[in-house]
Amino acid sequence: HKLEIPMAIPYQQMALIRFLLVLGLVCHWLACLWALTLQLSDDQSPKWIDGIRESDQVNQISHVYTYLSAFYFCSYTMTSVGYGDLGPKNITERTVCTMMILTAGLCWAYVLGEVCGIVTEMSIDSQRFRKRMHQLNAMMDHQDLPKALRLRLRSFFLQNRYQAFYLTQQELLKEMSPQLQSEVCTALHLPWIEKVSFLQQFMKLIRFQEGKGVHIGPYHACIADISRELKSVAYAQQESFENVQVLYILSKGLVALDNRIGHDGTVWGEDFVLSDLSLIRPVDAFALTYVEVMCLSREGLMSVVERRKRTCP
């Protein structure tokens, strides 16, 4: 935990490095055992090191040279490469080599299975996306949709690929403690909260109460409740949508709002809290590109107000 708390550790990559170190450690132990056979065998018996003397044309072989040669033999034995340039030359070496092969085979199978699982987990989002695109193409072929519509659908799903990040964010928030939920939601949504007049006043009230030493936990919990009411919606290019009692926060793309252009962070529909529809100023939104927006309905906000009567002035 001492490393995990201050650092953002890539767990899949760390797991791969850990298994690589385990593989190297097992190869080291086996190499030491394989080098030990030089001492266990009779002096008159041929030994596996003899082949290295002949191929490398050296008379004196140091301990480092022996270890590197043994490590080389054990590494390709464990990974089942098997070059065949080294091998046991007597019954002692064959016995030890048999035990090494069985041990190395089990270790290699375990490491390989774990690594495959990690790699699969790392690409699980890509697999889901490819499966969804395959299903989309199959549906369009089966229904014989027009080519122009097919292009729009593929474009939408390709650009919509990363909207799942928001859903993952919501799932993470659910697993946090109430206090952490409040603090994280306030930090995430403060930029657009400051653009909505009555929520801006609410934030000023929170700061004022905090300055007086009042416990502001319930106030932040109210912000967290409002954040949980947000819905993420995506619109394809050239789609139009209205804001009848709905607050919109643009998180991606460009949108035409009557006589102005909205970009990331733009907020409109701030009068969504009004119950009289005749008092709401209609804003026609037109997606100039693929857009992703977060929506807060009046019903969602009112449900929070009902639950938090004491902390929602």
Image (cartoon, rainbow, N blue to C red):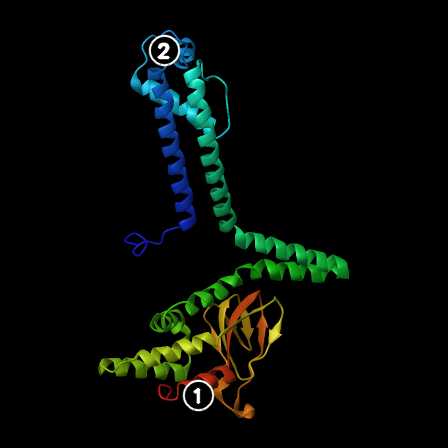
Spatial separation of the CA atoms under disc 1 and disc 2: 89 Å
Q: Quadrant of residue 46?
A: top left
Closer mark to the observer between disc 1 and disc 2: 2
Image spot of residue 284 (x, y percent)? 58, 79
Q: Which residue is labeled 1 in the image?
A: 306
The number of numbered discs placed on residues in the rendered structure image is 2
Q: Is residue 246 above or below residue 183?
A: below
The crowd level at tag 2 (other Cα within 10 Å; few <14, some 14-19, many 20+) is few
Secondary structure under the numbered disc 1 in the rendered image = helix
Q: Is residue 71 above or below residue 136?
A: above
Q: Which mark is residue 42?
A: 2
Of the numbered discs 1 and 2, the one sitting upstream in the chain is: 2
Image spot of residue 61 (x, y percent)? 32, 13
Q: Quadrant of residue 100?
A: top left
Q: Is residue 60 left or right of residue 11?
A: left
Q: Quadrant of the N terminus?
A: bottom left
Q: Quadrant of residue 234?
A: bottom right
Image spot of residue 115 (x, y percent)? 47, 42
At label 2, the amino acid type is Asp
- The residue at 48%/87% (across/down) is 273
